[in-house]
Image: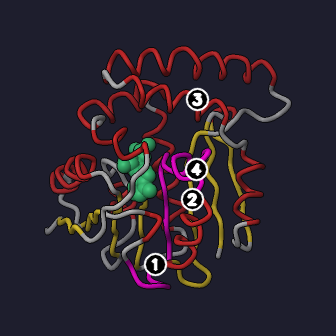
Amino acid sequence: MATNTTDENNKSEFLHDEVYESIPPNYDLINHLFTGGMDILWRKKAAKEAVASHPKAILDICCGTGDLSISVAKIAGKDAQVTGLDFSRPMLDVAVRKAGKAGLDITFVTGDIADIPFPSDSFDSICIGFGFRNLTYKNEVSAQYISEVLRVMKAGGRFVIVESSQPAPNAKIIKFFHRLFVRYIVSFLGRIISGNSAAYQYLAESAENYYGAEELRDLLLQSGFSKVTFKRLFFGAAAIHVAKK
Ligand SMILES: C[S@@+](CC[C@H](N)C(=O)[O-])C[C@H]1O[C@@H](n2cnc3c(N)ncnc32)[C@H](O)[C@@H]1O
């Protein structure tokens, strides 16, 4: 089975560029550690949502080391074509190795979500695992990212987002522990294990202040999606949103 990469577009100049150039060796391990392994289950749930409408062409944006692309490819059916897109070469190198090992035919492409290197109306389903925060947290081009997702998605297509979130507004005790965990444990452990202090400081700060599930739903509706549903995961520490074009 061919697992390949193409270098079509690699032009983003954001801080995130540097952040993701130096994470890959421990990236998967740290994710599993922070979530007690629940991120694996959450991606699987998101993958099920992404293939629920039996799509033929599926794009995983900000695919990183490829875990969500792989989960999708395993359940998408033989006729479906899965593509992973990310601007970090080192992350994609890991993704290519993992997909090859799993015997899956996934195309990994280097490119920026601000200028997705595919024609309009190319995909039935688009998904993103723990990357939407990067695209939309204090990011001045977030509207451009979302409009690119809408452009390459076919009419009636679905956009599935699995992302860290906030505990429900009335869950005060959970909110307290969530804040403690994100503020102190994530940045401390991330720095120690990865050696990349800036990356995990950014992760902690953005996770603490990111949208709650209702706010993210509203953002998607305001951005042009016609219908948005969501499910909270683990008391709201994360959420899966499904947005229809
Ligand atoms: C937190 S990681 C998530 C990786 C993977 N989806 C997962 O589930 O673990 C975010 C990824 O988004 C990528 N990324 C961030 N901004 C991007 C952009 N503008 N264009 C393409 N990739 C981007 C980074 O390179 C990184 O691989």
Q: Residue at x 66, y 21 (%)?
A: 179
Circle nearer the N terminus (3, 4): 4
Asked if the residue under mark 2 is in contact with the one under mark 4, i.e. CB atoms within 8 Å, the reply is yes
C-alpha gap between disc 1 and disc 3: 33 Å
Q: Residue 124 magenta-drawn?
A: yes
Identity, as a three-letter code, of the amino acid under mark 2: Val
> For residue 32: magenta?
no
Question: Marks 1 and 2, Cα distance to the nearest angstrom?
Answer: 22 Å
Give the amino acid type for the residue marked by disc 3 in the picture.
Answer: Glu
Q: Position of residue 182 (x, y in %)?
A: 58, 23
- Magenta span of residues: 118-140
Is 65 situated left or right of 12 in this image? left
Residue 61, position in %: x, y? 43, 60
The residue indicated by pointer 2 is 141
Question: At numbered mark 3, what does the secondary structure look like: helix, strand or loop?
Answer: helix
Q: Which residue is mark 1?
A: 123
**Callout in the foreground (4, 1):** 4
Give the spatial CA distance, label 4 vs label 1: 25 Å
